[in-house]
Image (cartoon, rainbow, N blue to C red):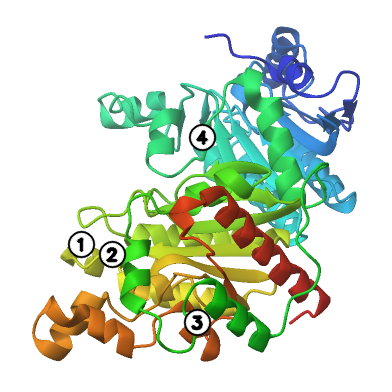
C-alpha cells in the first residue's frame, strides 16, 4: 500500500492552491555534528525541513488549520523544535478560530534529544486542550505508523479520530516491545481496523476519501453551514394545553379512555421506525462515531454528528434494532452516550438524545461494569450541560436505561411512546406475582405520552395520525421538526 508523505497528503486533500504554510525556519544552533548530519540527511530524504508541516487551507471550501507529520524525516519523531512548531500552529489556529486537523505519522519522541523532547508532548497536549476549550473542532487522521508518546498525547485527543487502512497504531512500537520482552507483539492488535472494533477509533478512512469525510465533519462540528434546499419546521410552538388536546385527538386517545397497552404493543413491533429511520428520512447528513474512545463499544447505542434542516447537532440514540434479551443496553453504551454529551458541550452544539429501549442489561457483568453508576453519571452530566438539549421518547422507554437519557431541558414524545420504571411485565410480577396483569398495570401507571405531557414529564407530543410503522418517513420528519422547534426555543431563552 502506498503511504503518502506530508506534502503529498496535503496536496491530495486540500482545495488546489489553498494551502498557506505557517512554518518558520528551524534554528539548529547547539546541535552536535553527528545530529546535525542526521538532520541534513533527513531533509534530503523527506524534502522537508522538519518532521511536521503546518499551515491553513480550504477543504471543500471549509477553512482549517493543518498539522501534518512527515514520517520520512527521522521517523516523524518529535524533537524540541518539532514540538515548538506544532504548538505555534495550534495556538494560531485557536487565535484565528480555525478548526484543527492533525495527521500524525510518528514513532514518538526523538531519541537523539531525549527527555527535553519527551516532555514537550505535554506542551502540545496543553495547546490542544485549550483549542478544544475554546469550542473549536479538533480532528485526527492517524497514519501509518503512529506510536509512542505521540499516540499517548495529542494524537488521542480528537473529537473525531479516524485512521489509514492497515495503519500500525499503538503505544509501544513493535521493535521496542520485541527488544524489551524478547518476543513479537501479538498480531492484529495494533492495527487501525482492530482499534475501530474496540471502540478506540471512529472509522478507517482511505486517503482518497479523507477530503470528503473531513469536509463533512467540519460542516457538522463547526455548526455554521446552512444546507440549501432543506425544510424548516413550522414557526412557533403551541402552548402545552393545545398540544395535549391535539395529541389526544390525533392519536385516538381522547379523554382518559386510551389504551396504554395498545401503545406498548405498537412500539414493540419489529417494523416500528427507530433512530436509524429518523436519521435516514430526516437528516441532511450523518457522520457516525464509534465507541467510547476508551476501548469499549456497544452497538445498542448510536452516536453521530448529524444535521436536521441545516442545524448541526450531536445525536445519541438507543438503537432498537440491536437491542435484545441477549444483547441489552449495557454500561459501555452509556459511556458512549457520555462521550456524546462531552462532544456537544465542548463544541457548543445541540444534543439530541433518542430513547428507545426495552430496558438496560440485567446481568452480573453489567453490575460489575458499573451500570448503575453510569446511569447516575449520565443524569449528572446532562443536567450540567449548557447547550440546547432535547430528549426524544421515540418508542419504548423502560427503566434506568431510559432514565439515563431523559433529563434534557426539553423532552418530547411520539404519540405512542411510553415511559415506565420497569417493563410492564416486571411491574406486574412485583405487584401480582406474575406477568399476567401487565396491561392493567401499564394503564394504572400513567405511562402514555399524553399522560406524561399532562404530568409535565414531557413538553410536547408528536402525534401519530397513523401508527409510525405505516408512515416512517412522515413520522421521522415530524419528530425532527419538533426537535428543531425545541432547540430554537432554548436558543431564544438560554438557561
Seen in the picture, residue 128 relative to 4 is either above or below; the reply is below
Task: Give the CA distance from mark 4 to mark 2.
Answer: 25 Å
Residue 94 in view, yes or no: yes
Quadrant of the snapshot with the C terminus: bottom right
Badge 4 crowding class, 10 Å Cα cut-off, few under 14, some 14 to 19, many 20 or more, is many
Residue 101, percent from left and from top = 72, 38
Q: Earlier in the sequence, mark 4 or mark 2?
A: 4
Residue identifier under label 4: 203
Helix, strand or loop at label 2? It is loop
Residue identifier under label 3: 450
Residue identifier under label 1: 365
Badge 2 crowding class, 10 Å Cα cut-off, few under 14, some 14 to 19, many 20 or more, is some
Residue identifier under label 2: 369
Residue for point 81% across, 29% down? 60
For residue 401, which numbered disc appears in the image? none
Q: Are marks 2 and 1 in contact (CB under 8 Å)?
A: yes
Helix, strand or loop at label 3? It is helix
Task: Give the CA distance from mark 2 to mark 1.
Answer: 6 Å
Seen in the picture, residue 229 relative to 455 is either above or below; the reply is above
In this rendering, position of residue 113 left or right of residue 198: right
Q: Are marks 4 and 3 in contact (CB under 8 Å)?
A: no
Q: Nearer the observer, disc 4 or disc 3?
A: 3
Res. 198 image quadrant? top left
Res. 175 image quadrant? top left
Most foreground residue, 357 or 378: 357
Task: Give the CA distance from mark 2 to mark 3.
Answer: 35 Å
Badge 3 crowding class, 10 Å Cα cut-off, few under 14, some 14 to 19, many 20 or more, is many
Amino acid at each position: 500500500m502506498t503511504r503518502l508523505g506530508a506534502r503529498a497528503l496535503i496536496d491530495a486533500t486540500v482545495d488546489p492552491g489553498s494551502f498557506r504554510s505557517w512554518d518558520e525556519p528551524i534554528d539548529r544552533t547547539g546541535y552536535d555534528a553527528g545530529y546535525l548530519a542526521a538532520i541534513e540527511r533527513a531533509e534530503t530524504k523527506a524534502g522537508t525541513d522538519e518532521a511536521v508541516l503546518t499551515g491553513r487551507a480550504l477543504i471543500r471550501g471549509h477553512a482549517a488549520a493543518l498539522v501534518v507529520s512527515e514520517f520520512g524525516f527521522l521517523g516523524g519523531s518529535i524533537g524540541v523544535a518539532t514540538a515548538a512548531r506544532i504548538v505555534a500552529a495550534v495556538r494560531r489556529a485557536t487565535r484565528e478560530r480555525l478548526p484543527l486537523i492533525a495527521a500524525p505519522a510518528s514513532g514518538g519522541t526523538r531519541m537523539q534529544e531525549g527527555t527535553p523532547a519527551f516532555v514537550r508532548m505535554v506542551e502540545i497536549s496543553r495547546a490542544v486542550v485549550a483549542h478544544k476549550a475554546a469550542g473549536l473542532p479538533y480532528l485526527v487522521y492517524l497514519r501509518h505508523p503512529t506510536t509512542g508518546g505521540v499516540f499517548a498525547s495529542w494524537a488521542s485527543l480528537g473529537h473525531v479520530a479516524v485512521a489509514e487502512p492497515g495503519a500500525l497504531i499503538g503505544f509501544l512500537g513493535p521493535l521496542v516491545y520485541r527488544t524489551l520482552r524478547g518476543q513479537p507483539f501479538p498480531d492484529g492488535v495494533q492495527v487501525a481496523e482492530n482499534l475501530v472494533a474496540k471502540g478506540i477509533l471512529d472509522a478507517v478512512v482511505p486517503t482518497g476519501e479523507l477530503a470528503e469525510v473531513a469536509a463533512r465533519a467540519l460542516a457538522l462540528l463547526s455548526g455554521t453551514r446552512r444546507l440549501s434546499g432543506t425544510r424548516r419546521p413550522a414557526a412557533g410552538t403551541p402552548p402545552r394545553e393545545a398540544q395535549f388536546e391535539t395529541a389526544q385527538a390525533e392519536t385516538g386517545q381522547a379523554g382518559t379512555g386510551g389504551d396504554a397497552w395498545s401503545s406498548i404493543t405498537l412500539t414493540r413491533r419489529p417494523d416500528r421506525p427507530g433512530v436509524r429511520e429518523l436519521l435516514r428520512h430526516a437528516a441532511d447528513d450523518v457522520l457516525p462515531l464509534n465507541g467510547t474512545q476508551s476501548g469499549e463499544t456497544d452497538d445498542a447505542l448510536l452516536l453521530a454528528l448529524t444535521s436536521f434542516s441545516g442545524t448541526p447537532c450531536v445525536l445519541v440514540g438507543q438503537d432498537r434494532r440491536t437491542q435484545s434479551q441477549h444483547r441489552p443496553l449495557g454500561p459501555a453504551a452509556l459511556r458512549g452516550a457520555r462521550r456524546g454529551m462531552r462532544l456537544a458541550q465542548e463544541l457548543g452544539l445541540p444534543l439530541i438524545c433518542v430513547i428507545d429501549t426495552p430496558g438496560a442489561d440485567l446481568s452480573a457483568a453489567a453490575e460489575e461494569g458499573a451500570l448503575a453508576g453510569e446511569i447516575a453519571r449520565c443524569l449528572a452530566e446532562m443536567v450540567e450541560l449548557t447547550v440546547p438539549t432535547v430528549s426524544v421518547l421515540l418508542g419504548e422507554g423502560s427503566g434506568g436505561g431510559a432514565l439515563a437519557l431523559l433529563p434534557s431541558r426539553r423532552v418530547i414524545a411520539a404519540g405512542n411512546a411510553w415511559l415506565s420504571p420497569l417493563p410492564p411485565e416486571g411491574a406486574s410480577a412485583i405487584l401480582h406475582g406474575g406477568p399476567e396483569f401487565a396491561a392493567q398495570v401499564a394503564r394504572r401507571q400513567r405511562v402514555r405520552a399524553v399522560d406524561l405531557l399532562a404530568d409535565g414529564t414531557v413538553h410536547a407530543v408528536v402525534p401519530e395520525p397513523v401508527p409510525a410503522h405505516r408512515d416512517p418517513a412522515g413520522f421521522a420528519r415530524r419528530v425532527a421538526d419538533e426537535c428543531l422547534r425545541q432547540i430554537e426555543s432554548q436558543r431564544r431563552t438560554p438557561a
